[in-house]
Image (cartoon, helix red, strand yellow):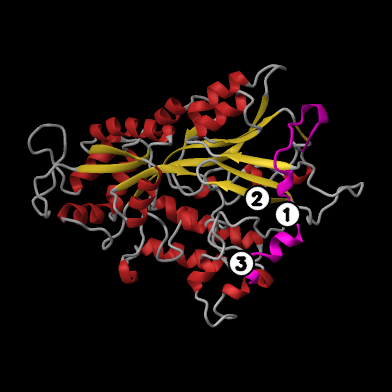
Amino acid sequence: MGYLQFGVSPKHVYKNFHPDYNADATYDDFINATPPDDLPAVVMGPWVPVEYAPGQQLVMVRNPYYWQVDEQGNQLPYIDEVVFNEVQSGEIRTMNLISGKADRTNLENPQTFSLVRQATQGEDAPAVVKFGPFGIGYRIMMNLSKYKSINDDRDAELRELFRMKEFRQALSHAIDRQAIANVAFPGPLTQPWYGGYPSGSGYYNEDRVVKYKYDLVATKGLLKELGFEDTNGDGILNWSKNSKIAGEELVIEMLIGQDQAAAVDAGEALVSMFREAGIKLVIRPTVGQTTTTLTEAGDFDMYFTRLDSAQPFWQMDQFGPVDDRTPIWHTAAAGGERDLLLFEEEIKEKMLESRFITDATKRKALYEDILELSTENIYQLGVYEVRRGTGLHKRIRNWQPDLPPYMYNWSINSIPGQILYVEEEEQFETSFQDLIPTEADYKVRSWNK
């Protein structure tokens, strides 16, 4: 269905906005029928969103119509209110946890691992931390589009270069992955990664991963074969005379979201590694919406970011060309114009086939084929991977350590939050119980007019 691209819409609530049921409605009406501030939302889960301040806070209260009960017949959930406070970075979330200002956070930034470990040792520590398998990868995506956001001859030449497997191999051989992983956080929580899926994925198979390891001699040999040569002795290679930009230096700009500190640090390490190979890498840190705007427009050379998914079947758009808008490093131009590489066509075919396979063993075999295609062709440049972690305040009880909390993308999807509770002496005062919705709150809504 596409992660975050499809949601079940209750017919009795929203059909008035759908053109199949209302001749005056359009699909835009249906898409815009539920703005974020139109609360309470219609849900089947344990909590209902009742208050939302963009960029600040989301408040959820227990759903009085929730269907689950515990063994004694008590209606779930146990916790009356859940408050999500938005912060600018994962580092701030982590600091809030270890200072006692927050109850739960994901741990995905290796820059904070040392601090977290120190702060969670001993009986007086406010929180506990658990790390699971490798579920996060830091990767470079090379823009493979021949048609989208081509502004000049340099853009056109770079895109054609990225589409050459030999050049992608040269870049892979130029990266000392172990060194970058050690800079991020030395020890068992980080390790080199060669792309595809993080090794903690249920679809990962080490034997199917093709690795182009650090080998500067191989890099230089491949670049020479492609016609690059340092013509003025400054250490930077120049485009060959057969190029539209003959004689110009081989300069590549790499987009990095500056809110991902680990990505920025790794990017700076890559600058010196690529320089040794004769490539001038220029880091371009951007913020939030700017990063999204540039990547969606295809206006970048390379994009270095964190991959938070280890589940290719659930989130296909992160791993292959499922539709014209995916993957982000090879989207179609206006009108759907796009030339997929041969191995991309194979990946797309296998991904589309997987949608109708119910046998888990057969589906896994198909995604192992995709893993091999992706790594053999360096579809994305994997750099290093990180163990996914979860931090939880000690006042939160009934968090089952034997559950598989890293089966899904985020641990919050794996831990049944409705059974969590807090001892009475450790509870906070409730603040939003007057917002618990009743049937009347829904009857007066615009969708029923």
Say which residue label 2 marks.
Answer: 50
Amino acid under disc 2 = Val
Q: Is disc 1 placed on a helix, strand or loop?
A: loop
Say which residue label 3 marks.
Answer: 446
Mark 3 or mark 2, which is nearer the start of the sequence? Answer: 2
The answer to the question of whether label 2 and label 3 lie on touching residues, with beta carbons closer than 8 A, is no
Q: CA distance from mark 2 to mark 3?
A: 16 Å
Image position, residue 259 (x, y; %): 42, 36
Residue 334 at least partly seen: yes
Residue at 75% in and 52% down: 63
Amino acid under disc 3 = Ser
Q: Quadrant of the C terminus?
A: bottom right
* Camera-side mark, 2 or 3: 3
Q: Specify the segment rendered in magenta.
A: 421-449
Left or right position of 48 against 335:
right
Residue at 76% in and 46% down: 418
Residue at 91% in and 50% down: 73
> Which quarter of the picture shows residue 420?
top right
